[in-house]
Amino acid sequence: MIRSHVGKPPVSQKIHFQIGDTPKHTISFYRSICYTIILGKLPDTTDCKYRSSNIILLKLASAGIDDAIEEPTIEDYKQLLCNAVSNFSMLGVGADKITRDFDIFKETMNRCASNDKPARFLLVAPDVDWVNHGAIRRGLGDNHFSKILINSLRKIAELKCQNGMPIEVRFYRSTPLFRMIFVNDEECWFGYYSESVVNSGENEFVNKSHTNIIIRRPKNKPPDRELYGAIEAYYNTLWEKSTDEIWDFKKYLS
């Protein structure tokens, strides 16, 4: 189901996976459950639209697609951090939304980062040209985004250098295609990156991101035959290719 947000309709009112061109061709597992609880019986499964929707949802679940979050907010990322107990890895432009609430971020790293499996951050280097160009196009000043990237790096460095947490950071310089956050060795938030400008002088993604799908590692399939394993392998490949951009937790912070 698509998760709801503060100020948006509760889950029971949201459209989940749409079949067809209009909302009347949609159905929600949540609504089905409520219907069963209230009336004491299942909805009419002879309805073709119901059966088609359920088949699609079952196929998505079988592929490992567990959920979706439409434009995840800071609160959604906080919830992700609070639910993370082990094995944290991330691919993103920066880590601003993850580090925004420093106390929650610190607690998450305490739980997830270990000597055996350090927390991994694969982030854009703050000095790449396209980061500054994106800020200029929005009328925000050429170093607006680089300052945000550096601020999140400063928070990560504090945990590494002052608290001794096992954290590794590597950089990449190309424009990303996707964003990924892996937690608990079984859950991946998978989103995409795109350049768009809504209003001049505004960072349209300051408090939200593009839609993410939640992918889970299935328990009955080998890693090379399921979606989570493929995405994890892709991340690991990018990580290994970034050995020449290992951060020393000093550069960019002076």
Image (spheres, rainbow, N blue to C red):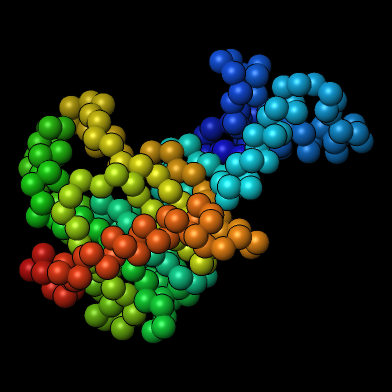
Whether residue 152 is visible here, answered yes or no, is no
Q: Image point 26% across, 26% down: which residue?
A: 198
Nearer to the camera, 2 or 53 = 53
Asked if residue 37 lies left or right of residue 207, the reply is: right
Q: Image point 10% across, 39% down: which residue?
A: 133
- Residue 16 drawn at (x, y percent): 60, 32
Considering only vertical position in the picture, is 200 above or below 85? above
Considering only vertical position in the picture, is 19 above or below 80? above
Q: Image point 20% across, 46% down: which residue?
A: 175
Whether residue 167 is visible here, answered yes or no, is yes
- Residue 136 drawn at (x, y percent): 9, 36
- Residue 59 drawn at (x, y percent): 64, 40
- Residue 246 drawn at (x, y percent): 19, 71
Considering only vertical position in the picture, is 47 above or below 129? above
Q: Image point 11% across, 69% down: which residue?
A: 251
Considering only vertical position in the picture, is 73 above or below 168? above
Nearer to the camera, 66 or 249 = 66
Quarter of the image that includes the N terminus:
top right
Asked if residue 233 lies left or right of residue 48, the reply is: left
Quarter of the image that includes the C terminus:
bottom left
Q: On the image, which quarter does residue 73 sit in?
A: top left
How many marks are shown on the rendered structure?
0
